Image (spheres, grey):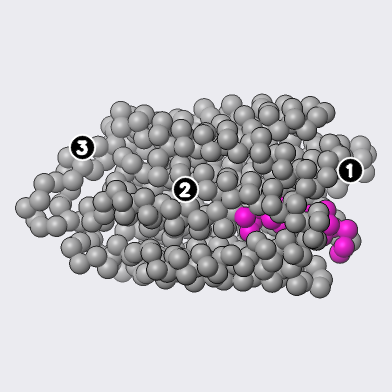
Amino acid sequence: MSAASSSPAVPGPSGITEQGGAAGTNTWDAFNDRQRWVLIFVLFLVMSSGAIDRTIVSIVFEPIKQEFHVSDTALGLMTGVAFGIFYAILGIPLGRYADRGDRRLLITVSVAVWSILTATCGLARSFLQLFLMRIGVGIGEAGGSGAPLFSLLADYFPPERRAKAIGFIQTSTISGAILGLIVGGYVAQYYGWRNTFILAGLPGLLLAAIAGLILREPRKHHSLVLPDPGGESTLDALRALTRKPTFIYTILAQTCFTFATAALIFEQSYVTRVLHVGVAETGLATGVLSIGSIIAGNAFGGILSDRLARKDITWLCRLPGYGMMLTFPFYVASHLVPGLVAYSLLGGIAATLMVGVLPAMMSAMLAVVGGTRRATGLAIAMLFTNLVGLTLGPIVTGMLSDRLALSIGPAEGLRWAIVLALSTFYPTGWFMLRAARTIQADFEL
């Protein structure tokens, strides 16, 4: 794009679009809508694969628990420490590379790594071996489904269109998780938990090849003259980001949110243990009854976020703030009803609200981190949210379940452990409402 080209629309603090910026310096100027939709399709598959690999372990909690004779706390450690800590810590160096290097290569290799190791989980002969393999899956996902992926998406889409794009990508996470529940539940019940891991992992090798062939790195586009990220260190980037209250509030909100959603890893055990439903029926019933409302909520949430933010950018924070506070009562109600149908319907409403506001929350983060430290900012946020939220969510929930089981039994113990963990949706909403007060001042293209 030449210097004489018309100035592209860029976001301003009062809304999303206003004129300004140098032509040819915005990566999204190099791509048309067809290329953007091809990107979304590939990233949709990547995120779906990652969601399946993460979800599949929850559907086989009970058979793993029985075969290896481990506690709910141990299962929480496997999900939280084995996956979460390494996913979070490795995100920083991988994020730094993503801000300067080839994200296409990074995503391709990462998909191959987590797919191979997911399949290898089916060969584990001890709980320790399974634990170590889940560490490898976490490392792979840090490079393929975390900050580098969203950094690449943000380079394809202008700010006023990101929430909708993020909504479609987030939908892949939910649909992949539900597919994992349905297919994984069936395979686990009739063919065993080992074959469940193998079936979940092997298709990812084909996906890695597709990603390598189709994805493009915008930095290699000859028509773009992009800002030089300079020699800013990770520590300097962290200092710059922590001067922005919106960044801090959004991290705190995401941490509370991740803690709550990580506790939901026990939902399949809850249905099996409390509602006395078979593994296959559990995956089928919860998946079929929830998928429509969840996909609709995510897609609608992205569209709504973009429209509201064009008028007032603070809606990128206010929408998640109000939405998270509405989510908790429906989740509580779903854990107090006795039947599977009522549980699934109420849980579906809660999930629709929850995922419907996620595109706005992610867009709020992207709006303040800046283009030259985008993946680094997301990786730093994921470091804190995953170390605290993703790691502690399953551990605390498992420990609460084991402790409460001593007095009220394993079924009721798990029920109230999940309810207590989900109460963190309230501080999630509060922190996002606080971020709404500062996002205009902290905005950076």
In the displayed structure image, the side of residue 30 where residue 102 appears, left or right: right
The x, y position of residue 99, in whole percent, is 36, 63
- Labels 2 and 3: the sequence-earlier one: 3
Q: Amino acid at mark 2?
A: Ile
Q: Which residue is denoted by mark 2 in the rendering? A: 169
Q: Quadrant of residue 64?
A: bottom right
Badge 1, how many Cα within 10 Å: few under 14, some, many 20+?
A: some
In the displayed structure image, the side of residue 33 where residue 139 appears, left or right: right
Residue 65 colored in magenta in the image = yes
The x, y position of residue 342, in whole percent, is 74, 27
Relative height, residue 189 to residue 286 (above, below)? below
Q: Amino acid at mark 1?
A: Pro
Q: Secondary structure at mark 1?
A: helix
In the displayed structure image, the side of residue 351 where residue 312 appears, left or right: left
What residue range appears in magenta? 52-68
Badge 2, how many Cα within 10 Å: few under 14, some, many 20+?
A: many
Q: Are marks 2 and 3 in contact (CB under 8 Å)?
A: no
Between 76 and 380, the one lying in front of the other is 76
Residue 238 visible from this viewpoint: no
Comparing marks 1 and 2, which lies closer to the viewer?
Answer: 2
Q: Which residue is denoted by mark 1 in the rendering? A: 410
Residue 407 colored in magenta in the image = no
Q: Which residue is denoted by mark 3 in the rendering? A: 18
- Labels 1 and 3: the sequence-earlier one: 3
Q: Residue at x 61, y 35 (%)?
A: 351
Between 389 and 188, the one lying in front of the other is 188
Question: Marks 2 and 3, how far apart in space?
Answer: 26 Å
Q: Residue at x 58, y 35 (%)?
A: 292
Question: Marks 1 and 3, how far apart in space?
Answer: 57 Å
Q: Secondary structure at mark 2?
A: helix
Q: Secondary structure at mark 3?
A: strand
Q: Residue at x 9, y 56 (%)?
A: 3
